[in-house]
Amino acid sequence: MTRLATRFVVLSTAGLLLSGCLVSGKDDDSPDKRNYVAMGDSYAAAPGVGRANPPLGCRKSKDNYPHKLADAADLDLTDVTCSGAPTEAVMTAYNALGDEVAPQIEAVDEDTDIVTIGLGFNDLGLSLKVFVACVQVTTRNPGATSPCTDADRNLGANGTQAILDQVTDRLKVVVEEVTERAPDARVFLVGYPTIFPTGATCPNLGMNAGDMPLMNHIVSSLNTSLKDAAAAYDATYVDLATPTVGHDVCSDDPWVAGLQPVGGRKAMSWHPYEDEQELAADTLAKLIGSD
């Protein structure tokens, strides 16, 4: 990977991961439809997958899994998902590449019937450590076996594990607030898919095979936090990691983009393709049912 290509990926990914989103209007105000609020970060917003859904700072797609689910289950959708959103974005206003955005929680009220939540990867700069810093350190140390793991270990108390240890409690704050505002709603915490291979790496990943144990541990830990937060409030955890095994960035049929999208597929770097969004929507639709 050239230095120019690395610089482009790092800058574009950093801009995406630090962006926010705006509360969008409901797609349909029909009183016969159940009210569905979709909350989350870029793995729910699906930047680059299809038709853009304003504001531009949010990098949100109208072909993301919330829209696909709303169509499949005939739901009245309010999509407040946002690329770059940390758990704090639920409770406080934030900036989305220049767009001032309302807290995601404002979309939830006592009339809300269904809520999906997909958050955690952007907390305390975790996604930047993985998708930006790791690519940079790998490029600077081409001969190292596990440059990202080594760099993370050298951070000591400021490393990724210190962040991961806080995610469960941060997610519990979100779920608690959602359940208080919408006590009758069905709440689903949507996990992250399989992003990284377990063994050999590939050029489009921009990381070395020796760092895959750390990368997979990060995703697994985030999913465990989502599962634990769901269990604490009688919500439902939605596992996307298991059904996407074999569809990591380096697989023959990737459902998540790496440094660049491949095979004519559309997605921003490091984000899910439409295949993964369809899986999420189908899985949720089966859990929710149509009645």
Image (tube, grey):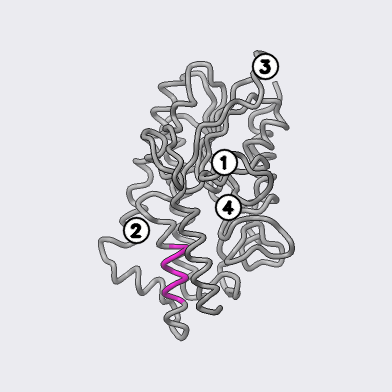
Sequence-wise, the earlier of marks 3 and 2 is 3
Sequence-wise, the earlier of marks 2 and 4 is 2
| Callouts 4 and 3 close, C-beta under 8 Å | no
Residue picked out by circle 4:
193
Residue picked out by circle 2:
161
Sequence-wise, the earlier of marks 4 and 3 is 3
| Callouts 2 and 4 close, C-beta under 8 Å | no
Residue picked out by circle 1:
238
Taking the view exactly as shown, the residue that stands out farthest to the bottom is: 143
3D distance between C-alphas at marks 2 and 4:
20 Å
Amino acid carrying label 2: it is Gln
Closer to the camera: disc 3 or disc 2? Answer: 3
Amino acid carrying label 3: it is Ser
Taking the view exactly as shown, the residue that stands out farthest to the top is: 31
| Callouts 2 and 1 close, C-beta under 8 Å | no
Badge 2 marks a residue whose secondary structure is helix
3D distance between C-alphas at marks 1 and 4:
10 Å
Sequence-wise, the earlier of marks 1 and 3 is 3
Badge 3 marks a residue whose secondary structure is loop
Q: Residue at x 61, y 53 (%)?
A: 272
Q: Position of residue 12 (x, y in %)?
A: 51, 60
Residue 30 — which label? 3
- Nearest to the observer: residue 243 or residue 13: 13
Closer to the camera: disc 4 or disc 3? Answer: 3
Q: Position of residue 1 (x, y in %)?
A: 56, 78
Circle 1: is it few (<14), some (14-19), or many (20+) Cα within 10 Å? many
Magenta segment: 130-138
Amino acid carrying label 1: it is Val
Q: Position of residue 186 (x, y in %)?
A: 54, 26
Residue 178 is drawn in which quadrant? top left
Q: Does the magenta portion include 230?
A: no
Q: Position of residue 222 (x, y in %)?
A: 45, 50
